[in-house]
Image (cartoon, helix red, strand yellow):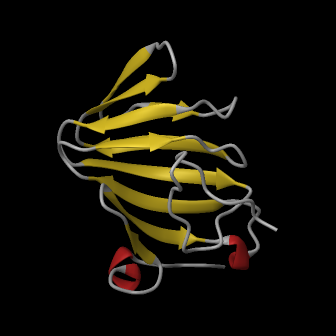
């Protein structure tokens, strides 16, 4: 059994930060669950380009407001607490945080821990 608390993750190597977000990584590939899970906050007023070419992701919003614009031609979805979206087709998108947007993210294949988006919005291939 794995039991972790957010306070144990904050300010460790599992607390990964980028310009527009911070991601506290609860489960990683090394945990052997077959998926990873993160508690992520996208900062108010920011926009993040995301294109997970190598991962599937499900996202559940627990706080804040934002919008997801599928590229290149829409649609655009409003993200509020209680909204779940799944990038089942590796959709390229902009995620805009109107306020601090807190989401729980699940990835398959699982993240290894220190991934950040490259210039295309992609995480590297997991080997």
Q: Position of residue 65 (x, y in %)?
A: 24, 35
Q: Nearer the viewer, residue 86 or 90?
A: 90
State which quadrant residue 120 falls in: top right
State which quadrant residue 91 falls in: top right
Q: Position of residue 106 (x, y in %)?
A: 58, 52
Furthest-front residue in this view? 119
Q: Position of residue 13 (x, y in %)?
A: 46, 85
Which residue: 56% across, 61% down?
Answer: 37
Q: Nearer the viewer, residue 90 or 31?
A: 90
Q: Is residue 11 depicted above or below 51 in this figure?
A: below
Q: Is residue 38 left or right of residue 65?
A: right
Which residue: 34% across, 80% down?
Answer: 10
Which residue: 75% across, 64% down?
Answer: 126
Q: Nearer the viewer, residue 105 or 68?
A: 68
Q: Is residue 118 left or right of residue 36?
A: left
Q: Is residue 68 left or right of residue 86?
A: left
Counting every numbered tag in the picture gives 0
Q: Is residue 52 depicted above or below 14 in this figure?
A: above
Q: Is residue 61 depicted above or below 79 in this figure?
A: below
Which residue: 56% across, 32% down?
Answer: 92
Q: Is residue 28 left or right of residue 85?
A: right
Q: Nearer the viewer, residue 89 or 50?
A: 50
State which quadrant residue 88 falls in: top right
Quadrant where the N terminus is found in the figure: bottom right
Q: Is residue 32 depicted above or below 12 in this figure?
A: above
Quadrant where the C terminus is found in the figure: bottom right
Furthest-right residue in this view? 127
Q: Position of residue 52 (x, y in %)?
A: 62, 44
């Amino acid at each position: 059994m794995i039991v972790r608390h957010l306070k144990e993750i904050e300010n460790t190597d599992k607390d990964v930060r980028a310009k527009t977000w911070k991601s506290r990584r609860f489960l990683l590939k090394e945990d052997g669950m077959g998926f990873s899970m993160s508690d992520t906050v996208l900062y108010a007023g920011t926009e993040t380009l995301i294109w997970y070419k190598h991962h599937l992701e499900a996202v559940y919003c627990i706080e804040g407001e934002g919008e997801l614009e599928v590229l290149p031609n829409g649609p655009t979805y409003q993200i509020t607490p209680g909204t779940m979206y799944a990038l089942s087709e590796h959709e390229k998108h902009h995620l805009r945080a109107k306020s601090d947007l807190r989401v729980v993210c699940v990835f398959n294949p699982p993240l290894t821990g220190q991934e950040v988006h490259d210039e295309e919005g992609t995480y590297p291939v997991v080997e």
